[in-house]
């Protein structure tokens, strides 16, 4: 770990960003350009004291997870992210296997959707980041660890995750998720998809039965019906923006203007704010 260079690199990248670049308000009392330390810490999901010690060349060496979070918070490109890992004393992530880095351009789009439900999904069905509105709509999907990070795995192993959809939609949703997993597995059987398949076959008879049907090509429609614990059914349209470099998808949920579901989203946004 190169404490001096790590601190200097983080400071220069922090000072190069403006609040608007990461979806934060500038505020009337801001006297200098760049982000504050506490703002970077909040964006990375760590304490301001922890981040401050890194910039002050104190404290323990940050973990790979912390460095990945800082790379996302500072909107680093892949070369910058790799440099950050080297300075932190960790091996450079293998780009073909690591999927938690989000393209800075996609992050800039996400930061401007503060009043919209949107999230970034990895190639393995893992929610990497959500807007506050998305958390208010479907819950915090980034809190899971291990194989449960994948929506494919959670559907068959975490009953509470099915509450987001009407019960009559569950059978088709299960088949669609299984078809998505099969496609990922066919492309890379020795990848995370293979681990998920092996684990689900061992614990879920429902998954095993659907998997044995070898269904392919099933996809979600643009229109979705979601269940919110306070607002009830919400009819939404889901637009997908694919980042081919990272094989990640930006999902954006919208409602027809003037509809009851649109009013519910506006109410959700007001409560969330």
Image (cartoon, rainbow, N blue to C red):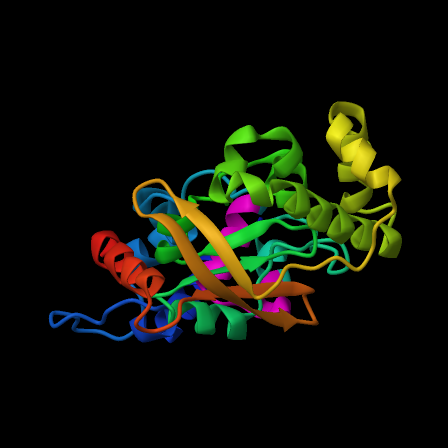
Give the residue at x 81% y 49%: 182
Given residues 273 and 22, the one toward you in this image is 273
Where residue 25 sits, quadrant-wise, is bottom left
Q: Main secondary structure of the magenta part?
A: helix
Asked whether residue 70 is drawn in magenta, I would say yes
Residue 11 x/y as whole percent = 40, 64
Asked whether residue 137 is drawn in magenta, I would say no
Compared to residue 224, the image places residue 195 above or below, namely above
Q: Which residues fall within the magenta stretch?
A: 65-81
Compared to residue 86, the image places residue 59 above or below, namely above
Residue 204 x/y as whole percent = 74, 27
Quadrant location, the C terminus: bottom left
Give the residue at x 64% y 59%: 220
Q: How many marks?
A: 0
Residue 101 x/y as whole percent = 60, 59
Given residues 252 and 173, the one toward you in this image is 173
- 174 lies left or right of 51: right
- 53 lies left or right of 271: right
């Amino acid at each position: 770990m190169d404490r001096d260079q790590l601190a200097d690199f983080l400071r220069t990248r922090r000072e190069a960003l403006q609040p608007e670049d990461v979806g934060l308000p500038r505020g009337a009392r801001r006297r200098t350009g760049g982000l504050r330390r506490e703002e970077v810490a909040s964006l990375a999901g760590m304490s301001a004291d922890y981040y401050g010690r890194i910039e002050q060349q104190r404290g323990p060496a940050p973990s790979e997870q912390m460095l990945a979070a800082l790379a996302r918070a500072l909107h680093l490109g892949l070369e910058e992210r790799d440099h950050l890992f080297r300075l932190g004393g960790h091996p450079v992530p293998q780009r073909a296997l690591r999927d938690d880095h989000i393209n800075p351009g996609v992050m800039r789009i996400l930061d401007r959707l503060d009043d919209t439900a949107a999230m970034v999904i990895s190639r393995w069905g893992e929610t990497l980041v959500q807007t506050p509105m998305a958390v208010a709509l479907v819950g915090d999907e980034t809190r899971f660890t291990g194989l449960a990070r994948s929506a494919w795995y959670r559907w068959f192993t975490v009953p509470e995750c099915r509450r987001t959809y009407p019960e009559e939609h569950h059978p088709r949703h299960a088949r669609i998720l299984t078809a998505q997993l099969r496609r990922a597995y066919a492309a890379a059987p020795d990848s995370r998809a293979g681990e998920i398949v092996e684990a689900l076959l061992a614990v879920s008879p429902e998954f095993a039965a659907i998997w044995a049907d070898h269904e392919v090509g099933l996809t979600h429609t643009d229109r979705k019906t979601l269940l919110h614990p306070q607002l009830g059914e919400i009819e939404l349209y889901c637009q997908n923006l694919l980042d081919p470099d990272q094989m990640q998808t930006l999902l954006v949920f919208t409602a027809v203007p003037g509809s009851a579901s649109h009013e519910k989203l506006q109410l959700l946004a007001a409560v969330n704010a």
